[in-house]
Image (spheres, helix red, strand yellow):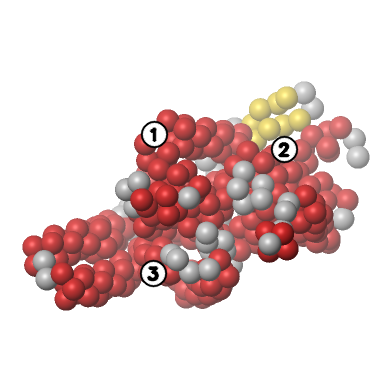
Amino acid sequence: MDFSIAAILAQDGVSTGAIYALLALATVLVFSVTRVIFIPQGEFVAFGALTMAAMQTGKFAATASLLLAFGIVAFLMELYDAARQFRLIGDASGLSKALAIAASKYLVFPLVIFILARTLATARMPMLLQAALTLAIVVPMGPLLYRVAFQSLAEASVLVLLIVSVGVHFALVGLGLVIFGAEGSRTTPFSDASYQLGTVTVTGQSAAIVLVSLILIGTLYMFFERTLVGKSLRATAVNRVGARLMGIGTAQAGRLAFTLAAGMGTLSGILIAPMTTVYYDTGFLIGLKGFVGAIIGGLASYPIAAVGALLVGLLESYSSFWASAFKEVIVFTLVIPVLLWRSFSSGHPDEEE
């Protein structure tokens, strides 16, 4: 392997590692706030890529129909909870106010997005507008998914939440097959530019992926460090009961965590769609590699998770050159020494008692 090949592989590893870093941060965020190991993270990657691909081919983005269906189910659940609360308290004005808010969130907004997607299905939109509409369609599925599948189980054990997460993953994969079909799709590159750095050619698409990932990671850092809402999320991650006693709504924190995770997953799908053919089930493998990075960070440390995800991207890139048939095995084998090291270096509360 000469220097030029090593540099090209490093470029590929850094660009894919940047995507894995976003997914790793999303996984750590969701687990820290809600204790949910978010297996369906990869489905947002696939839904984002395939939704934008559908727009570029002049087709109606059927994910808008899925968003509306999620909204209807969530509203019915809110209606049931409000009816139970009314029987206990008997506050008619509070009930009508809660239902009005729920209807605006779970019915009106998804319906507006559905109509917008249907109206613009055959329109020729600029790529930035396509990306914005894709985010508007797919990202709201995050909080709706939390409301439908996880909010009522917020106090359950991590094992129960993991089982539900796996079930949601399989359900979304099946829905993806129904919506998008078995054929894969790609999107138009954001940039056809290329830059020469010595003997290495850096593509504009790779540069865009790294730049957007860095901007998003920096924005998340400022959000958690400088804003009251970000500090509330951190407080919920540290101690859910203490945060609730201090007046922080853990349900709202869970919905916000799922919104941010869905946003990072959708954006990742938009970024990788021009570089690789995405199928309805492609997101699972991509999300799993982000999960490896999150495991390296112990599902707790954001910087270590990001560095671990970058390491996964580089390892995958160089493995594809040396042993392409075993690159997935090599990447996922990385989890074993990390788990062993964490097992030996951390205490075991059950044994200490």
What's the distance in space between the residues labelled 3 and 2, CA to CA? 44 Å
Q: Residue at x 40, y 43 (%)?
A: 232
> Could you say which quadrant of the image residue 311 lies in?
top right
Image height of 346 relative to 42, above or below: above
Q: Which mark is residue 262?
A: none
Cβ atoms at labels 2 and 1 below 8 Å apart: no
**Residue type pointed to by label 2:** Gln
Residue 142: percent from the left, percent from the top? Answer: 42, 58
Q: Nearer the viewer, residue 105 or 151?
A: 151
Q: Residue extending furthest top?
A: 198
Residue 15: percent from the left, percent from the top? Answer: 66, 41
Q: Residue at x 60, y 36 (%)?
A: 210
Residue that label 2 marks: 11
Q: Which mark is residue 227?
A: 1
Residue that label 3 marks: 152
The answer to which of marks 3 and 1 sits earlier in the sequence is: 3
Q: Residue at x 80, y 54 (%)?
A: 344
What's the distance in space between the residues labelled 3 and 1, CA to CA? 28 Å
Q: How many marks?
A: 3
> Mark 1 packing: few (<14 Cα in 10 Å), some, or many (20+)?
few
**Residue type pointed to by label 1:** Thr
Residue 78: percent from the left, percent from the top? Answer: 26, 69
Image height of 162 relative to 202, above or below: below
Residue 250 seen:
yes
Q: Nearer the viewer, residue 18 or 257?
A: 257
Q: Secondary structure at mark 1?
A: loop
